[in-house]
Image: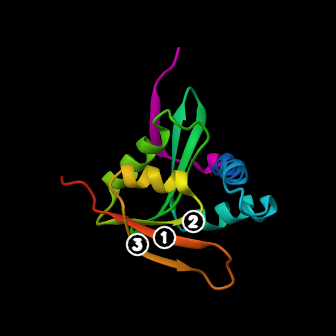
Amino acid sequence: MSTGLEVRPARPDELGPCADLYVRVLRATFTWLPAERHRREEFLSAAREEEVYVAVEDGVILGVAAVYRPQNFLHSLYVERRGKGVGKALLDHVLALATGPLSLKVQAPNRRAQHFYAREGFTCVEMGRDPGSEVAWMRLVKDRPAS
């Protein structure tokens, strides 16, 4: 019997499984980049300065979100089971904790993420490309909900 979806801060012992989920989803989704570019060390390194949240159901981590709080920047939002409300639950949780507008960057080829964030009320405020990167990105922003 399902105990329902719970969104909460990740425990220290869950950061490794979160990094593994991050890599699995990136490798399956970001097909325009070589799979070996996605490494768990990137997630674990960023997690030292970010707040990491997990969506858990029946003891299984279904999604992860990582936020750099000083800038209200959503650095990561990855889910393994799409279409089940996991991404929205994580995003709603992060938005509720934000102290101002929440921003994020999405790669231009990532149309699925762009549609998700547009549906959730984010707007594009900037486009760019990081030095040395072959992939363009879009910066999206959404005001936090009124209290």
Residue 20, image x, y percentages: 71, 49
Residue extending farthest bottom: 131
Q: Can residue 4 be seen here?
A: yes
Amino acid at pointer 2:
Gln
Closest to the observer: 49 or 123?
123
Answer yes or no: do the residues labelled 2 and 3 have beta carbons within 8 Å? no
Classify 10 Å Cα crowding around label 3: few (below 14), some (14-19), many (20 and above). few
136 up-or-down from 113: above or below: below
Q: Which residues are magenta?
A: 1-14
Mark 2 or mark 3, earlier in chain: 3
Where does label 3 land, which residue? 70
22 up-or-down from 7: above or below: below
Where does label 1 land, which residue? 138
Say if the magenta span includes residue 13: yes
Where does label 2 land, which residue? 107
- Residue at the image point whose x is 79% and y is 63% from the top: 34
Amino acid at pointer 3:
Pro
Q: Is 140 placed left or right of 96 in the picture?
A: right
Answer yes or no: do the residues labelled 2 and 1 have beta carbons within 8 Å? yes
Amino acid at pointer 1:
Met
| Spatial CA span between label 2 and label 1 | 6 Å
Q: Is 121 placed left or right of 104 in the picture?
A: left
- Residue at the image point whose x is 59% and y is 30% from the top: 59
- Residue at the image point whose x is 58% and y is 74% from the top: 136
Residue 100, image x, y percentages: 29, 66
